[in-house]
Image (cartoon, rainbow, N blue to C red):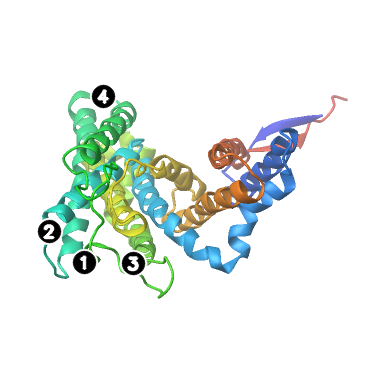
Amino acid sequence: MLEWRRRREPSLLMLGLSPLIAIGLTMLIGMIVFTAMGYDGFHAVGSIFLTPFLEPQRWGDIGVKGAPLVMIALGLAIGFRANVWNIGAEGQYVMGAIAGTGVALLTYDMTGWWILPAMALAGILGGMAWAAIPAFLRVKLQVSEILTSLMLTYVAVQLLYFLVRGPWKDPGGFNFPQTRMFTADQTLPTVLEGTLVHLGIPAALVLAIIAWLLMEKTTAGYAIKVVGLAPAAARHGGFSAARTTWATMLVSGALAGLAGLFEAAGPFGQLTPQFPVGYGFTAIIVAFLGRLNPLGIVFGGIVLAGTYVGGEIAQSTVRLPQAATGLFQATLLFMLLATDVLVRWRIGFKRRAA
């Protein structure tokens, strides 16, 4: 008879293998579900998980969608390491885009290399300001940052809707709810000529390396880990939980805001009601798929970006509904949490009593 046995120490092997097992189980479940719904399950799963990586012309699309996921997930992972649960990165992403777009509209008739950096700085500050609200409420009033950050997301989205339908509406946009298109000085430059690969992609990789150095090679990174794992030991060692909460929330908000500005100044080129695409929520899956490790998050970002691109392919080739992408992403998170049991537990055979 099979039984669960607790491991003496967490398995490093399963820590690395469980994300791969989760991906495999997600593919298997997807085949079963879509076949039962009357679709070609094998073709559907292949289109979502394999086609984007097997066709080189899709790699640029993966990079464009993966960059904001990686940037947001890096900030979330730093907070999660300290037991600071920022679930409202989507709102900070939107506020960063709003702040950066405000600078773009103010400088619309100007030219100069300094405009895009000013927009990026505004995006960072916008995300930080929105993250500072739940940080203040947690530190001063002990209010759960999970609830406050999440609820503020809907405030940010409604503010976006108000702006693009009201004071920021493009006067030459045929009454569509959108801002003016950004000018050349307000748009991210492309890295590879003739492709969609913009400056935000290498920026995301550089940020991942910086985050890894911060977490693994600095006292600040060590303090974040100690506060998360052993709060009593952190207090004894002089590490302030309040300062850690402020720092991690502000860093998380800054990266989400920068991702929002990069998305507005890159693929969108303006603000529209369709701008909130759920990257802030998907980045939570990316963070856990990458084991809260900045380098692992790059892998997680590529995988989840592939599901976005693959979902678009499956809509045209297999006629899957748009919600299929969300279904796969949610299943992946569930499978990842389920397979994490194998890190601390293993399956063995129960010995029969003599």
Distance between mark 3 and mark 4 Cα atoms:
38 Å
Q: Callout 1: helix, strand or loop? A: helix
Q: Nearer the viewer, mark 1 or mark 3?
A: 1
| Residue at image mark 4 | 143
Q: Earlier in the sequence, mark 1 or mark 4?
A: 4
| Residue at image mark 3 | 199
Please name whichever residue, 244 or 160, is drawn nearer the observer in this view of the structure: 160
The answer to whether 219 is drawn above or below residue 164 in the figure is below
The answer to whether residue 240 is seen in the rendering is: no
Q: Earlier in the sequence, mark 2 or mark 1?
A: 2
| Residue 124 image position (x, y, % from top left) | 22, 51
Name the residue at 37% across, 60% down: 204
Distance between mark 1 and mark 4 Cα atoms:
42 Å
The answer to whether 38 is drawn above or below residue 48 in the figure is above
Distance between mark 4 and mark 2 Cα atoms:
39 Å
The answer to whether 167 is drawn above or below residue 313 in the figure is above
| Residue at image mark 2 | 107
Distance between mark 2 and mark 3 Cα atoms:
21 Å
